[in-house]
Amino acid sequence: MTVPGEEFPYISRTPPSGAAGLSPSLPIDLILGRNSVSDFGLLDSGAAVNVLPYDVGLRLGAVWEEQTIPVQLTGNLAASEARVLMVSAAVGKFPPVRLAFAWTQSNSVPVILGQVNLFLEFDVCFFRSRSLFEVKPRSTGSV
């Protein structure tokens, strides 16, 4: 049985700049132990990994010194140290999934949802001309 997707609108970035300022930002609840943070994650199909800003990790109760697996980021974040942080994430009406984040010491980026592993857990279809996108859990059946 195929699970129906859930649609989300593109939202305005800050500062707003009309239609060009809209972005596919997914409401997401991040969970680590007993702590949770509700935020928006920028869906970035060109990003290799999920990225978590430092302050969001702290709000989840993560301790930097306890994360021991380094991650090398590229682009604007190449100079920022990052470490792997595993969290549970709830998206829309779907059951939580485990997501791996490159938790960076930078706060200059939003939560970024990339190929590893948001796009491995969910199918995402962008309808930019309609300013919305659809998300649904990956199919587990055989092809």
Image (spheres, rainbow, N blue to C red):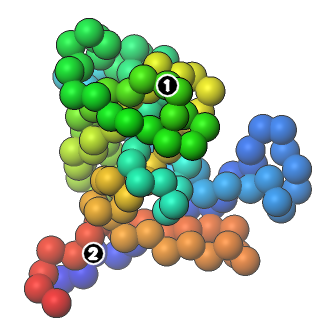
**Measuring 27% from the left and 60% from the top, which residue is drawn there?**
121
Query: Can residue 40 be seen at all in this image of the molecule?
Result: no
* Depicted 5 relative to depicted 20: above or below: below
Please state the horizontal and vertical placement of residue 105, each as a whole percent of the image.
46, 19
Please state the horizontal and vertical placement of residue 27, each as a whole percent of the image.
50, 46
Amino acid type assigned to the residue bearing label 2 in the image: Val
Q: Nearer the viewer, mark 1 or mark 2?
A: 1
Task: Return the residue at label 2.
Answer: 3
Q: Which mark is residue 80?
A: 1
Query: Can residue 105 be seen at all in this image of the molecule?
Result: yes
> Image quarter for residue 57?
top left
Q: Which mark is residue 133?
A: none
Q: Are marks 1 and 2 in contact (CB under 8 Å)?
A: no
Say few, some or many: other residues with alpha carbon within 10 Å of mark 2 (under 14 / 14 to 19 / 20 or more).
few
Say few, some or many: other residues with alpha carbon within 10 Å of mark 1 (under 14 / 14 to 19 / 20 or more).
some
* Depicted 37 relative to depicted 76: above or below: above
Q: Residue furthest left?
A: 142
Q: Secondary structure at mark 1?
A: loop
